[in-house]
Image (tube, rainbow, N blue to C red):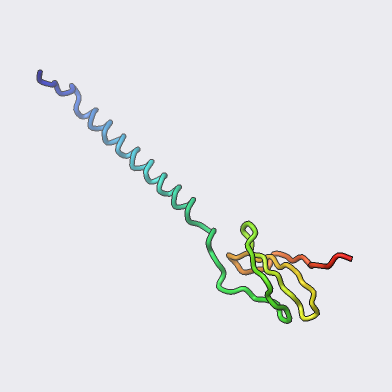
Amino acid sequence: MAEELPSNPRGLKAVVIILGVIFLGMMALFIYGLATKVGGKKGAIAAGIEIPAGETLIETTGAGDRLVLRLRAASGAERLLYIDPATGKALGSTALTGAP
């Protein structure tokens, strides 16, 4: 049997073009979503972190999205210094004291 062409091939052509544009738009959104999910601020590291004068770095560890430095002063007092690794700025500190 011979297939018959649709009575309005222009309408079919328009539907195919519209579906193609929608498909390309959805692919672009998918790729954008992957790029923003995978890339971004995470993983950025500051060029340098300044350790305060008179203190020695004892230990370094990560806690969530922060960098924690354990520092010891010349007097022997220790503290934890919380750093934002993306900017290198100090976010706060905690003094470590011994139990009585």
What percent of the width, then of the height, locates residue 93?
Answer: 74, 66
21, above or below 34, in the image: above
Residue at the image position 62 percent from the left and 73 percent from the top = 49
Q: Residue furthest top?
A: 1
What percent of the width, then of the height, locates residue 25?
Answer: 37, 42
Quadrant containing the N terminus is top left
What percent of the width, then of the height, locates residue 46?
Answer: 57, 69
What percent of the width, then of the height, locates residue 77?
Answer: 80, 74
10, above or below 44, in the image: above
Count of numbered badges drawn on the protein: 0
Residue 66, by quadrant, is: bottom right
Residue at the image position 44 percent from the left and 52 percent from the top = 35
Q: Judge from the rendering whether residue 56 lies leftward or rightward of residue 11; answer left or right.
A: right
Q: Judge from the rendering whether residue 47 lies leftward or rightward of residue 19; answer left or right.
A: right
Between 12 and 47, the one lying in front of the other is 47
Q: Residue furthest front?
A: 100
Quadrant containing the C terminus is bottom right
Q: Residue furthest right?
A: 100
Residue at the image position 79 percent from the left and 67 percent from the top = 96
